[in-house]
Amino acid sequence: MTTTRPEIAHLQDFDKATITPAQLKRWRKRRKLSQDKLAQFFQQLGYSTVGRTVRRWENGERKIPLWVPTLIDALDERFPHQAS
């Protein structure tokens, strides 16, 4: 039996290889991260991302890259879900 860490339980509603714009936005807001701040973390990891890119992903204007779900899963340890 596999146990899911409580802080990533909300990620179980999507395939780890994909994430919808709404899921990304909800994940980011629950961690009280701005689009620019999330982009900065991706930049620190070597990905060419700016706040405008995150905005376009969340608006559905651009396809969310396959690496994003993996990185947000890793960021969950640094930014646990915060109750609204």
Image (spheres, helix red, strand yellow):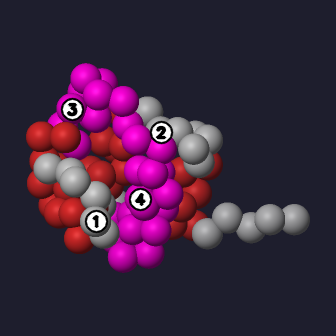
Reading the image, the residue beneath label 1 is 46
Cα distance, mark 2 to mark 4? Answer: 10 Å
Examine the image and state in which quarter residue 47 appears.
bottom left
Reading the image, the residue beneath label 2 is 19
Q: Residue at 87% across / 65% down in the picture?
A: 1
Q: Secondary structure at mark 1?
A: loop
Q: Quadrant of the C terminus?
A: bottom left
Type of amino acid at the residue the image marks with label 2: Ile
Magenta segment main secondary structure: helix
Residue 53 visible? yes
Reading the image, the residue beneath label 3 is 56
Cα distance, mark 2 to mark 1? Answer: 20 Å
Examine the image and state in which quarter residue 52 appears.
top left
User: Is 72 on the left or on the right of 45, as rendered?
Assistant: right
Cα distance, mark 2 to mark 3? Answer: 14 Å
Q: Nearer the viewer, residue 58 or 4?
A: 58
On whether residue 62 falls in the magenta region, the answer is: yes
Cα distance, mark 1 to mark 3? Answer: 19 Å
Counting residues from the N terminus, which is met first, the one under dot 2 or under dot 3?
A: 2
Type of amino acid at the residue the image marks with label 4: Ile
Counting residues from the N terminus, which is met first, the one under dot 2 or under dot 4?
A: 2
Type of amino acid at the residue the image marks with label 3: Arg
Reading the image, the residue beneath label 4 is 72
Counting residues from the N terminus, which is met first, the one under dot 2 or under dot 1?
A: 2
